[in-house]
Image (spheres, grey):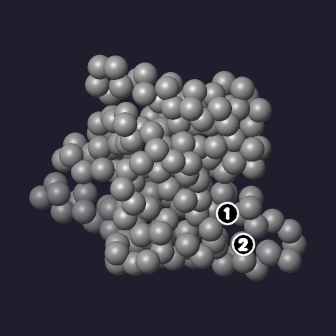
Amino acid sequence: MGAGQHRRPAGAAERWPRAGALGPLIRDPDGSVYPSARHLPSLIRGGMHAVLGPVWPGNRWTKAYRQEHLEPSERAVGWLSGSCLLLRRSAFAQVGGFDERYFMYMEDVDLGDRLGKAGWLSVYVPSAEVLHHKGHSTGRDPATHLAAHHQSTYIFLADRHGGWWRAPLRWTLRGSLAVRSRLMVRSSRRKLVEGRH
């Protein structure tokens, strides 16, 4: 974050008194904008993004979920990337902070959802910018992190689609995510092996 950038989310917090979380525009090392302000993943939008996103990034569900087509503007969103957040202490305490069941992934989505349900907003503040070097947390074992991402996705969706009558839906989700995870882990390991030769 550049000099003085930290003041911009704080200023936005004054303009948005119901903001529980505020997040900056996030740039990748190549200068491109990372889609850090998104809709909450509905079952259809999130599911179609998860299935089609890796093979068809321009599909309508991925575009709608990631909100990449929108010009960066200060606005309320469903959730913000947890890589850089300004959190209002009272809001964070009210919802019980981060849910410790999540390991590295979906904890920010879950927080945004719970803040919204408690009457707080997640506000995107693109006038503040940060540079994010992705991948440092995943380290040398991306397979473990891919599996954790799929497990966290299941926890998030299962929590929001409870009840005995939705058990078949949860079984389908668990099975689909397990298959996708295995395929992605296998591909990741193959790329690691190929990279060593």
Q: Considering only vertical position in the picture, is 134 above or below 3? A: below
Of residues 142 and 106, which is closer to you in this image? 106
Q: Quadrant of residue 16?
A: top right
| Callout 2 amino acid | Arg
Question: Residue 86, image x and y in percent?
Answer: 53, 30
Residue drawn at x 45%, y 39% is: 125
Residue 162 in the figure: left or right of residue 75: right
Q: Mark 2 — residue? A: 170
| SS type, badge 2 | helix
Residue drawn where x is 43% and y is 22% of the image: 7
Mark 1 residue type: Leu
Question: Which residue is situated farthest in the right direction here?
Answer: 164
User: Which residue occupies 37% across, 50% down?
Assistant: 72
Reading the image, the residue beneath label 1 is 157
Could you tell me residue 194's position as x and y percent?
18, 62
Where is residue 182 drawn, in percent x and y? 46, 69
Q: Give the SS element for disc 1.
A: helix
